[in-house]
C-alpha cells in the first residue's frame, strides 16, 4: 500500500509517495505560502497534489511545525504556518479529501524516523536535535515518544540559554540555528549575513583557513555542547542524533565533538565528573527525509483519529 506523505516547512511543502517499507517512490516540492497567507491559500497549494494521487494512496501523513495534538492535528501553534493556529488540521483535511489523515510535529517526526530505522534504532532513551533556522527535535523515553500535556516536548528553540537575557530572542536556543554562523561572521567583518550561509562558512574554513569562520563555528558548537550536556544530565539519554542540512557536513561534527570533549574536561565536579551521564552523539541517518519517514511511522503505528 502507498501513502501520500507531506513535510511542510516555511520554505517548501515537500511531498512523497511512499510504501510501508519507507521506499520513496516519487518525491517533489512546491513553494510554501507566506506566513501572512490564509488557510485557503494553503489549500490551493495542496489540493492539486492530493487530487493527483487520491485514487492510488491509502492515506495522507503530514509532518509540520508547531505544538500540535498528534491525535487529531489540532494546532496550538503552527510555526511558520501560523494560519493553521487554532485549526484542527487532521479533521479539516480528512473531511476535505475523504482519506485518512494523520498529523505529527516535524521534530517528533524526525526522532520517530531515527528511532524506527535510523541512528537511534535500539535505544530506549534518546533524542534528536534538528538544526534549522531555529532548533527543533524530539525525545524518546522508555521507547515511547515524549509528547507532553501541551504537546511541546522537544521544542528546544524556547529553552533559555542566558539567564541575564529573558526579554529578547537572543537569550534563547532558537538563536543558535544555522543562520547564526553567518550572523557571527557578519558582526566581525561587516559583510551582509545574507551572503554567508553554512556552505560559505565551511568553504572559508577548509579553503582559506579563515580564523573568523573557525571562530563562528566554534562559538556555535560550544553552545550546542552545553545543551547536549544538559539534555544528557536531565534525561540520562543513551544517544543524541544531530540532524538538519548543516549536519551533513562532517566539519560540523568534528567541531562539535571537540566542543563536547573540551566541556567535559573542564567540569568542576572533581571525582563526579567521570560519573556523570554522557550521551553518545551521532549524525542522523535520514537528514532531509527524516520528517517524511517519521510522519509515515506515525500514520502506520501511531494513535490518531481521522481515519
Image (cartoon, rainbow, N blue to C red):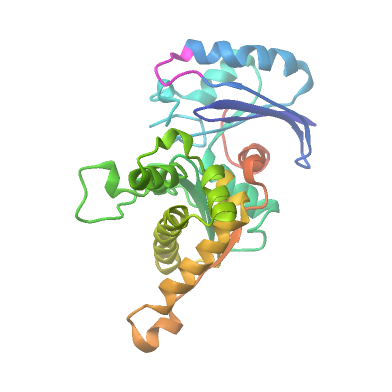
Quadrant assignment, res 152: top left
- Of residues 72 and 47, the one nearer the viewer is 47
Residue 44, position as x, y percentages in the image: 56, 10
Q: Residue furthest bottom?
A: 271
- Of residues 30 and 66, the one nearer the viewer is 30
Quadrant assignment, res 80: top left
Quadrant housing the N terminus? top right
Count of numbered badges drawn on the protein = 0
Which residue is located at x 58 percent, y 14 percent? 45
- Of residues 19 and 243, the one nearer the viewer is 243
Which residue is located at x 46 percent, y 52 percent? 213
Which residue is located at x 64 percent, y 25 percent? 100
Residue 279, position as x, y percentages in the image: 52, 68
Rendered position, 145 above or below 31: below
Quadrant housing the C terminus? top right
Residue 284, position as x, y percentages in the image: 62, 53
Query: Which span of residues is magenta-colored?
Result: 33-39
Rendered position, 102 above or below 153: above
Q: Residue furthest front?
A: 208
Which secondary structure is most common in the magenta stretch?
loop
Rendered position, 245 above or below 255: above
Residue 206, position as x, y percentages in the image: 59, 55
For residue 57, side relative to residue 130 (left or right):
right
Residue 37 drawn in magenta = yes
Residue 259 drawn in magenta = no
Which residue is located at x 54 percent, y 26 percent? 90
Asked whether the viewer can see residue 149, the reply is: no
Rendered position, 220 above or below 21: below
Asked whether the viewer can see residue 147, the reply is: yes
Amino acid at each position: 500500500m502507498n501513502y501520500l506523505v507531506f513535510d511542510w516547512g516555511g520554505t517548501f511543502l515537500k511531498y512523497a509517495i511512499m510504501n510501508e517499507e519507507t521506499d520513496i517512490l516519487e518525491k517533489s516540492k512546491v513553494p510554501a505560502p507566506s506566513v501572512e497567507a490564509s488557510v485557503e491559500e494553503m489549500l490551493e497549494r495542496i489540493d492539486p497534489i492530493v487530487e493527483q494521487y487520491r485514487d492510488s494512496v491509502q492515506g495522507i501523513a503530514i509532518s509540520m511545525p508547531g505544538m500540535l495534538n498528534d491525535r487529531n492535528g489540532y494546532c496550538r501553534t503552527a510555526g511558520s504556518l501560523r494560519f493553521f493556529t487554532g485549526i484542527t488540521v487532521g479533521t479539516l483535511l480528512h473531511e476535505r479529501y475523504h482519506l485518512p489523515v494523520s498529523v505529527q510535529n516535524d521534530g517528533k517526526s524526525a526522532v520517530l524516523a531515527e528511532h524506527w530505522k535510523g541512528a537511534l534504532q535500539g535505544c530506549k532513551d534518546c533524542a534528536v536535535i534538528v538544526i534549522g533556522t531555529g532548533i527543533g527535535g524530539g525525545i524518546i523515553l522508555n521507547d515511547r515518544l515524549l509528547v507532553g500535556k501541551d504537546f511541546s516536548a522537544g521544542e528546544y528553540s524556547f529553552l533559555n540559554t542566558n539567564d541575564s537575557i529573558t526579554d529578547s530572542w537572543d537569550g534563547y536556543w532558537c538563536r543558535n540555528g544555522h543562520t547564526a554562523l553567518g550572523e557571527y561572521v557578519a558582526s566581525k567583518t561587516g559583510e551582509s549575513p545574507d551572503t554567508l550561509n553554512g556552505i560559505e562558512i565551511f568553504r572559508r574554513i577548509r579553503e582559506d583557513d579563515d580564523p573568523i569562520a573557525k571562530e563562528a563555528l566554534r562559538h556555535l558548537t560550544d553552545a550546542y555542547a552545553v545543551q547536549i550536556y544538559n539534555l544528557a544530565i536531565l534525561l540520562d539519554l543513551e544517544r543524541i542524533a544531530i540532524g538538519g542540512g548543516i549536519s551533513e557536513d562532517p566539519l560540523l561534527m568534528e567541531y562539535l565533538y571537540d566542543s563536547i570533549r573540551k566541556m567535559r574536561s573542564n567540569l568542576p565536579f572533581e571525582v563526579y565528573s567521570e560519573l556523570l551521564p554522557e550521551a553518545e552523539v551521532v549524525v542522523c541517518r535520514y537528514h532531509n527525509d527524516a520528517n517524511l519517514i517519521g510522519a509515515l511511522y506515525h500514520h502506520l503505528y501511531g494513535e490518531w483519529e481521522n481515519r
